[in-house]
Image (spheres, helix red, strand yellow):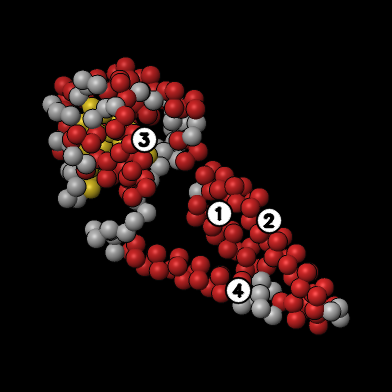
Amino acid sequence: MPDSTVEDFLEITCRPGLDVLVARWLRPIELAELQRGYVALLASAAAGNHRRWLLDVRRLNTHLMGASWMIAQLLPQLGPCRGGHTRLAYLLAPAYARDESADATFPTPEYFIDKPFVGERFVEERAAVDWLLAPEAATQPGRSTRCWGLACCLLSVIPKKYMSPKRPAALAFIFATILIDVIGLGVIIPVLPTLIEQLTGEGVSWASQYAGGLSFAYAAAQFFFAPVIGGLSDGYGRRPVLLASLLGLTFSWP
């Protein structure tokens, strides 16, 4: 199936070799655009006989939009149109995944029993693809569905033989960055009391206490602000927050 774009808000592609139909919403949309997009997605799935859908809705203005329309009109069409069991993996932003009101609108596992389709939500694309490619029994509705999704999220941090060629380079860069950061922090610790002693003219006992206070202040700042950084990462994405943190760290060293 050739790649296609529905106006300027939806991109539909097919993962080569995986038989996974990928739909990425590109911007916030209105209800009418949501309906047109899913109708086009249904037609693309029928043309390519795709029963595994990866729905990237991280850029939508709200994932509650059109939920009742999808349950009442779109999902019932999957059986007659597809002629088999269809899997739908929704890729959500972390902040949306923790939204209680959004959780209430998503069908419960019991809803998918005896249906020609099954759906699940993820915050990691790799975990979603693993779930889509899992054996049929692993995606059956019920408690095991959410357990499988959680297992995929946990296993997604472990390198695998079939990982992208770019991933080892990215991991090496991350490890090198952390190593340099730890070296920069640790290299000052043995000489910090002496530096404070020379700067203040006080004895080594007082300088050691002052160095201990500085170390405590650094650890306390990490303890209190790590959750804040985590919340910002969920809201704005890990990359912007990580880059901003590294930028601030760069200016703090001088």
Question: On screen, 180 above or below 97?
Answer: below
- Give the CA distance from mark 4 to mark 1: 24 Å
For residue 56, say whether it is visible: no
Q: Nearer the viewer, residue 145 or 90?
A: 145
Q: Which residue is mark 2?
A: 220
Q: Amino acid at mark 3?
A: Arg
Q: Amino acid at mark 1?
A: Val
Q: Amino acid at mark 4?
A: Gly
Q: Which residue is mark 1?
A: 241
Q: Which mark is residue 121?
A: 3
Residue at 42%, 23% in the rendered image? 105
Instruction: Kindly report which numbered mark, 3 or 1, lies closer to the viewer in this rendering.
Output: 3
Residue at 69%, 65% in the rendered image? 215
Question: Of label 3 and label 1, which has the lower sequence position?
Answer: 3
Q: Which residue is mark 4?
A: 186
- Give the CA distance from mark 4 to mark 3: 42 Å
Q: Position of residue 41 (x, y in %)?
A: 26, 33
Q: Would you say the residues marked 2 and 1 are in contact, meaning their CB atoms lie under 8 Å apart?
A: no
Q: Position of residue 61 (x, y in %)?
A: 48, 34
Q: Residues within 10 Å of mark 4 (few under 14, many from 20)?
A: few
Question: Of label 4 and label 1, which has the lower sequence position?
Answer: 4
Residue at 19%, 47% in the rendered image? 18
